Image (cartoon, rainbow, N blue to C red):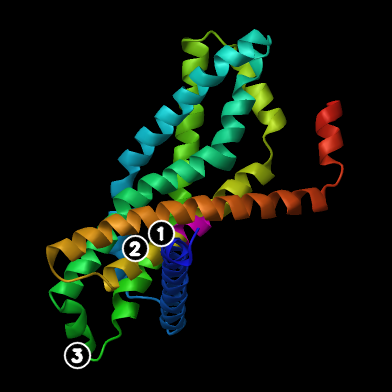
Amino acid sequence: MTSSALRAPISMIGQLTHGFFSAFGGLLVFAWDMLRSLKRGLPRRHVLVPILHEIGVRSVPVILVTGTFIGMVLAVQTFTQFKQMHMESRLGAVITMTLVSELGPVLAATMLAGRVGSAMAAELGTMRVTEQVHAISALGADPVAYLVVPRFLACVTLIPLLTAIADVTGIVAGWLFSCKVLGINSFDYWMYAEQFVTGWDVMAGLVKSLFFGCAIAIIACRQGFHCGAGSEGVGRAATQSFVYSFIAILGVDFLLTVALNTTYYLIWPNAVSLAVTGGW
């Protein structure tokens, strides 16, 4: 290949790399500004409560529907494979472990990134376009402390709680579907779920959801604060907020899974051998 033919792909790779690190650096600077504003004090009650209601209470129906279908889909997908190995009685362990440690946090965060993150980005983007953010600065207030900090606190506080609701809903839905439709014995369902699912699995899922909430809040608020002009810019900010949040959720989930699994086997080095030999 000639040098001119190589120039185009190399230039594209360079632009993508520059754009990634530029966006990541801007996100870190925005997060640092938000943390500095948070150190000055918590937002007032009349500012925080409406945001808590919008993010928490109004997200409950979506979370309930998401958790219900996750549990039933897991039951349907795993029942056929387990029945071929005559292990269908262990369905409760698979559904519960998958929900609390992986699918529950990830899918709940994805739904909240679409509902909560996009809404926050669109709301803040509209305030930026209509110069309400500049008006807050002109009045001597910190727009980050007034607009970003309450949303960050609401996401960090409520997304783990909403994830727990999705987990419980999915477990109950999977139990009902497995016992009433697939014919699994209820005692076996809960016995194996209790035997194989530990407090560490529940804690790992909640820790993941905590970091997912941080990522969704920071990405959505930054996209709203730096949106382009006009309605097109607001729409692009909302779309980018969901896409970037989803990518961040997958990346953070991978890193946290590796870190938590490594920590687990450092604390309990005999866990693998006990699981293999049935020593639980």
Give whichever of 231, 195 is nearer the camera: 231
Q: Which residue shows up at 24% across the image and 91% down it? A: 140
Which element carries disc 2, helix, strand or loop? Answer: helix
Q: Earlier in the sequence, mark 3 or mark 2?
A: 3
| Mark 3 and mark 2: Cα distance apart in space | 24 Å
Give whichever of 259, 229 is nearer the camera: 229
For residue 138, the mark is 3
For residue 216, the mark is 1
Tell me the kind of residue under disc 3.
Ala
Which element carries disc 1, helix, strand or loop? Answer: helix
**Disc 2 packing (10 Å; few <14; some 14–19; many ≥20):** many
Foreground: disc 3 or disc 2:
2
Q: From the viewer's perspective, is residue 67 above or below residue 149?
A: above
Q: How many marks?
A: 3
Q: State which region is magenta.
A: 210-214
Residue highlighted by disc 2:
220
Residue 95 part of the magenta-drawn span: no
For residue 162, the mark is none
Position of residue 241 in the picture relative to residue 247 (left or right): left
